[in-house]
Image: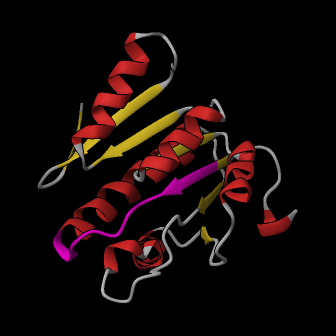
Amino acid sequence: MRFGLVVGDVLGVNLRTLDGVTNGFVVDFMAGLIRRYMVEGGLSKVVFIPFGFGSFADKFFDDDIIIAWLLKSRVPELRIITEELSPLQVLCLFNYFDRVIAMRHHAIIFAIKARKPLTAIVYDTKFMVLLRSLVRRGLVGNVGAYVVSRGCRKC
């Protein structure tokens, strides 16, 4: 399979590059969370799926590869997809994941669409509003969330 993915024991991860300080505590938090999912959840493969590839030179926050490499420095087994894929190709990748940790809006939507257990890393209130609405209406289950705000806390 392309990208070395086979069905079973795969954790999909998507993070957004923010400012340097925020990147630091998000990466620290994520390294611990990934370790926990690998040990407790029996997940043996971790794959980073970038949604932004720095298409705009002056907008570093659009380049998910920056935070992917920071995370890989803490989680050496992380596989980073460095090829820009179409939205359909990215959505298809979600079928290979057993669990998803997502920060970007569309990564959260793709995880929900693929019916994968989701841990959302929330940096914007629109994500909490969306997730609470879907959970309240019974449209999603198995969703957890952490809020980025001078650290990460469970909500």
Asked if residue 42 is positioned above or below residue 87 in the image, the reply reads above
Taking the spot 63% from the left edge, 41% from the top edge, the residue there is: 42
| Quadrant the N terminus occupies | bottom right
Residue 119 versus residue 123 in the image, above or below: above
In-front residue for pair 127/80: 127
Asked if residue 31 lies in the magenta stretch, the reply is no
Total marks placed? 0
Q: Residue at x 24, y 47 (%)?
A: 124
Which residue shows up at 44% across the image and 77% down it?
73
Q: Which residues are magenta?
A: 11-21
Quarter where residue 45 is shown: bottom right
Inspect the magenta stretch and tell me whether residue 19 lies in it: yes
Q: Residue 97: x and y, percent?
A: 68, 45
Residue 145 in the image, given as x and y percentages of width and height: 34, 35
Q: Nearer the viewer, residue 99 or 114?
A: 114
The answer to which image quadrant residue 120 occupies is: top left
Q: Is residue 75 visible?
A: yes
Corner quadrant of residue 111: top right
In percent of width and height, residue 118 lies at 50, 36
Q: Residue furthest right?
A: 1
Which residue is depicted at the point 27% across and 68% down? 18
Instruction: Pick out the residue farthest to the top.
Output: 137
Residue 116 seen in this snapshot: no
Is 115 drawn above or below residue 5 in the view shown? above
Depth order, front residue of 77/83: 83
Question: For the C terminus, which image quadrant?
Answer: top left
Task: Name the image colouring.
Answer: secondary structure
Residue that extends furthest to the left in the rendered view of this protein: 150
Looking at the picture, how far across and down is residue 57, in whole percent? Answer: 38, 89
